[in-house]
Image (tube, helix red, strand yellow):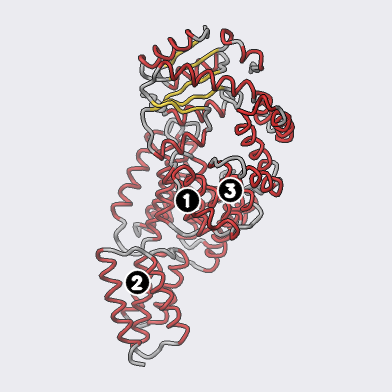
Amino acid sequence: MEEVDKNTLAQLDQLNVLIIDDNLLVHSILKESLFALGIKEVRCAQNAYYGLRLCDEMFFHIVICAFNVKSDKDGFHLLEELKFKGHVTKTTVLIFLSTETNESLVNSIIELQPDDFWTKPLAIKKVRSRFIALLKVKQVLFNINNAIDKKSYSKALYFADRHLQNEKLAFYHPNINRIKGESYLALREFEEAEKFYFQLFKQYKYSWVYLGYAKALLKQGRLEEISDMLKTLIDKPDTRFGAHDMMAQYFIEQEDYEQAYEEIKKAMALAPRNIERNKKSWDLARLTHDHKGQYVATKNIAQQAKNSIHDSPELLLNVIRASIDLACATPDESTNELLQQTERYIRQFEHDLHDANHFKQQLIVVKARLHNVRNEREKATKLVDNHMSLMPTSIVEDNLDRVKVLHELGMREDAIDLLAAINNQIAGDSLNSQVVRRYIAQESEQREEIHFTAKELNSMAVEHFQKNRLLPALEAIKQALKLSPKNIKLLFSQLKIMIKITQEDQDTEELREGAEKIIAELQHHKLEGKSLVTFEDLMLKWQKVTSKD
């Protein structure tokens, strides 16, 4: 790719500009403004497809992109792809256009780090003044940004220090200091970063200073020292998203996955388009046994990735898998609508496939699991015995799904062997690898200990309870809750069994402590409607049986 230098940036008539917007009036206003400045090469595209084609054909020093690009991908995914393909780098002037200014859009744009964000309608005078200011910043910061593009953070620090000693560049010192702080963090020099940001408090009150300082301390495990600052950051609209995202990362590193999951959900609500964050939410939902959260996360990924560089058939396949997992974890018969939707997803998946043979094994597995959850065990077993391979593939998710169907059909030894093979597939020390590795270990432990789904265990508990076999009923529900600990109906069932045991004077101190924990867990949930009525009824019964003592 052609590389732009400082001299080129200084020569306006040598700059190439790309405008991507579906509004021809925007093209006209911007071209008029740019031509008046002396820029001669301005190309325009009305959609993402032609914008990408133009980038493949020539190099652009400046890219101006609208969020709402009709007919194909939105501006967020377009800019993400332009960055991924190297068409947009830190040395490129990147300007984002939008008529919207809602918090979710602004947060998503901030993640892509454009140089400026212009709201429509555009004013010609404002366009010219801001454009010249952006070019000057890029010109001054070229060496630093070029080093960042090459991940040469030490070199970026060297250039930053040189520029900070130049009083003529005082106007640009905030930009330079921001890059300097980010370089310290990228080099994992957290103590240096802490000292650096602490000194900046004397000069600046920018949001990035507070977020950078907080991150430097969190990376050193010093959460308590900045707890008040974090509360303030979470309360402020311009730092709320960054604080939640940073806290999620911190809790993952501390292996506190429950807290990490709570933080990632808040970050996702504020900036829903980032696919990697959605995937992280899915992994954390799996670790915390939130089956509904897994289903929602996979649907979000499939929806947000549409027409992006992340789009693939596997995304819908993961939605199908998560919906079956949710059905297996739901203890009653309220899953009919979910299973009907799953069948529709399967039909859509088969219809959209260009190469059905490539996904033949995956379809066998999900169809077998669907038969099994519908209590059509014979059909499921026949599919697995006659058509499913036990050889592990190179794709972890495919292997995990086969483990599940083997376990659900009672082929536990095969399931355990396949889990061991999956564990050997997960390489690296990235946070994602750590989370997946932990999930596989959790799956291995549970599948050795528990031989049924939460739905099957609940059915066993109901049968035991009806025949007054209370302790076996309690044990079955406890196992079901290990698989689906957040399920309200299972918690209700456990409390109901404990009340019955206490009524018959078979309770122990341990059982009563367990019941109090269940009550506390239920109080933590925001119950309403029938669930609240059920809880209040169970509480009255519990108070009645315990008040006899």
Residue 441 screen position, x and y as percent: 59, 59
Tag shown at residue 115 = none
In-image side of 169 versus 52 (left or right)? right
Report the residue at 34% width, 57% height from top.
374
Q: Is residue 381 above or below residue 193?
A: below
Residue count near mark 2 (Cα–Cα under 10 Å), binned few <14, some 14–19, many ≥20: some
Foreground pick, 206 / 538: 206
Residue named by callout 1? 234
Residue count near mark 1 (Cα–Cα under 10 Å), binned few <14, some 14–19, many ≥20: some
Residue named by callout 2? 492
Report the residue at 41% width, 15% height from top.
124
Q: Quadrant of residue 72?
A: top left
Give the secondary structure at mark 2.
helix
Foreground pick, 319 / 286: 286
Query: Is there a contact, CB below 8 Å, between mark 1 and mark 2?
Result: no
Residue 389 screen position, x and y as percent: 53, 48
Q: Amino acid at mark 2?
A: Phe
Query: Is there a contact, CB below 8 Å, between mark 3 and mark 2?
Result: no
Residue named by callout 3? 432
Q: Is residue 499 above or below residue 33?
A: below
The first of marks 1 and 2 along the sequence is 1
Report the residue at 44% width, 58% height from top.
290
